[in-house]
Amino acid sequence: MAGTIDDALGGLGVRADTLSEDERERLDRDGFAVFPALLDAGTVAAVRARMEELEAEEDAWGAGTNPRDPGAVRVDDVNHKGEVFDALWQHPKLLAVMRHYLGDFRLSSMTGRAARPHTGHQRLHVDWWGDFQDGSVACNSGWLLTDFTKQNGATRIVPGSHRWGRRPEDDMEDPTATHPEQIQVEAPAGSLMVFNGYLWHGGTENTTDELRRGVFTVYSRRDQPRQNDQAGRLAEDTAARLGAAARYVLDA
């Protein structure tokens, strides 16, 4: 493995100027950022096609539906299920955001999630399961495989809520309700959305007849627990193609 997180990120193409000063300021102030159209149309199509294959293989529409997330067609651990996903979780812009928020970090989980038509509304929540601490401990990201619009259930977020030190259920009688400061993140397919693990956010209802697709990757600070044991899931063919830098980020 690479010696340090900075060694690893350098090996994966992250540079000092991968994030601009304005982008760093927005991440700190708002707790999220959207980077439009980082993936080309060919990459988006290839990832989407692989997701459709996995959904069929795992019966994600039927018996394989995740009981914790019945409003979505969901496939977990996709970073272990195809080389096509490598360009997503190893993307320099994404990794630079994680370095900014988390310092030394590792991949926690990677999930393909598609909001089903006429479902998908979630309560506002945070993506950290422990106590609030100084500094960020986890961060989520979403690669948009379809355009995210208000009609198909674009993610709602409450800007700046990552700095409040409390969860939606601490303030709101009903976290499924609309928050007066929330916005919906609309962006074209191929865009990257990242949000601090303390940021209040949630999916909204997909009112169309089409799936709203995305691939979501959570990273956590290296000294913190993570959602999935990446080493235990690492197949031989995946390990063989990953270099030392990628293995360091995967911590496997």
Image: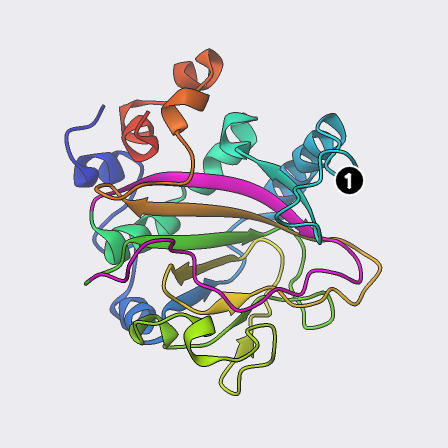
Q: Residues within 10 Å of mark 1 (few under 14, many from 20)?
A: some
Q: Position of residue 26 (x, y in %)?
A: 33, 73
Residue 113 within the segment the image draws in magenta: yes
Q: Position of residue 80 (x, y in %)?
A: 50, 26
Q: Quadrant of residue 67?
A: top right
Question: In percent of the image, x 38 and y 75: which residue is there?
Answer: 161
Vertical arrangement, residue 199 with respect to residue 216, above or below: below
Quadrant including the N terminus: top left
The extreme right residue here reads 209
Residue 136 within the segment the image draws in magenta: no
Question: In percent of the image, x 40 and y 28: which residue is there?
Answer: 230
Judge left or right: residue 133 versus residue 138.
Answer: left
Magenta stretch prevailing secondary structure: loop
Judge left or right: residue 134 versus residue 193.
Answer: left
Question: In percent of the image, x 67 and y 36: which residue is there?
Answer: 51
The scheme the figure's colours follow is: rainbow
* Region of the chain picked out in magenta, as a range: 104-133
User: Which residue occupies the foreground of this view, 93 or 156?
Assistant: 156
The extreme bottom residue here reads 180
Q: Quadrant of residue 166?
A: bottom left
Quadrant including the C terminus: top left
Q: Position of residue 27 (x, y in %)?
A: 33, 68
Vertical arrangement, residue 114 with respect to residue 239, above or below: below
Q: Amino acid at mark 1?
A: Trp
Q: Which residue is mark 1?
A: 61
The local secondary structure at tag 1 comes to: loop
